[in-house]
Image: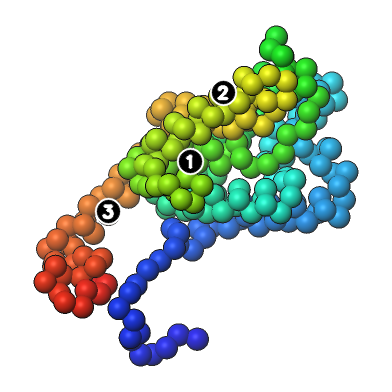
Amino acid sequence: MRSRYPSSSNFAYSFGPGPLTPAIKALVAANVAMFVIAMIAPAITLRLGLRPADVVSELYLWQPLTYMFLHSGIFHILFNMLALWMFGVELERMWGSRFFVKYYFVCGAGAALSTMLLAFTPFAFADQLYSSLTIGASGAVYGLLLAYALYFPDRPIYMYMVFPIPAKYFVMIIGAISLLSSMGGPGGGVAHTTHLGGLIAGYLYLKGGRVHLVSELKYRYLKWRINRMRRKFDVYSGGRADDVDRRVH
């Protein structure tokens, strides 16, 4: 129940980008539903998870898409859905739900494709990658993180929840970690190649001119108008500079 009276606190704060947007709400619901189903019927993971050997020999052509909705444990799905909310909400508001969903699946499918392609390379880990099972939304989430860094390069991201790093450098760091880990010998490339594939797929898609230009221009124009009105009426998040009890106005 919301009080009718103003709060006596001198502090105002918020956490995260705000409420779930429509597409992210649907994606979170689908992931949670599949997580519960997989707990009840674990065998479904073998059919819907990404295994290059099954895609090629058994023609399980749906796996490059369905693997994104499966997770190996509570913390796996928790962190992926948390990242989806934190980095996806603002992108969906800017792009619109239709383009956001398209981009999400392009990154996830691109991550799966990179995994399959690397399974046929002469590298040491290729044989294991060919027969290993990959699940999780991490490839698509890495693509969202790449887009977030391109649009908001100087936004701080807290690495390990402690060290604030500008988004552009954060993506460079995790990209380098994924690249080095994927070349780390047998077993090292199973999940990291998928992460790296999501980054690459997102970058190529955005740089290929597929961004919804009209939606982006509307977002930029609205943001400019809001900032202009704030300056005009001397409105700031911390109150006026000469306000002794600086509150949010």
Give me the residue at 81% from left, 24% from top. Answer: 131
The reply, left or right, for residue 59 in relation to residue 151 is right
- Residue at which label 1 appears: 145
Give me the residue at 68% from left, 41% from top. Answer: 136
Check disc 3 and give the amino acid type.
Answer: Lys
Residue 228 percent coordinates (x, y) = 17, 57
- Residue at which label 3 appears: 223
| SS class, disc 1 | helix
Residue 173 percent coordinates (x, y) = 46, 32
**Mark 1 neighbour class, 10 Å CA radius: few under 14, some 14 to 19, many 20 or more:** many
The reply, left or right, for residue 228 in relation to residue 186 is left
- Which circle's residue, 2 or 3, is located before the other in the chain? 2
| SS class, disc 3 | helix
Toward the top, the furthest residue is 122
Check disc 2 and give the amino acid type.
Answer: Leu
- Which circle's residue, 2 or 1, is located before the other in the chain? 1
Question: Is 103 or 3 nearer to us in this picture?
Answer: 3
- Residue at which label 2 appears: 180
CB contact under 8 Å: marks 2 and 3: no
Check disc 1 and give the amino acid type.
Answer: Leu
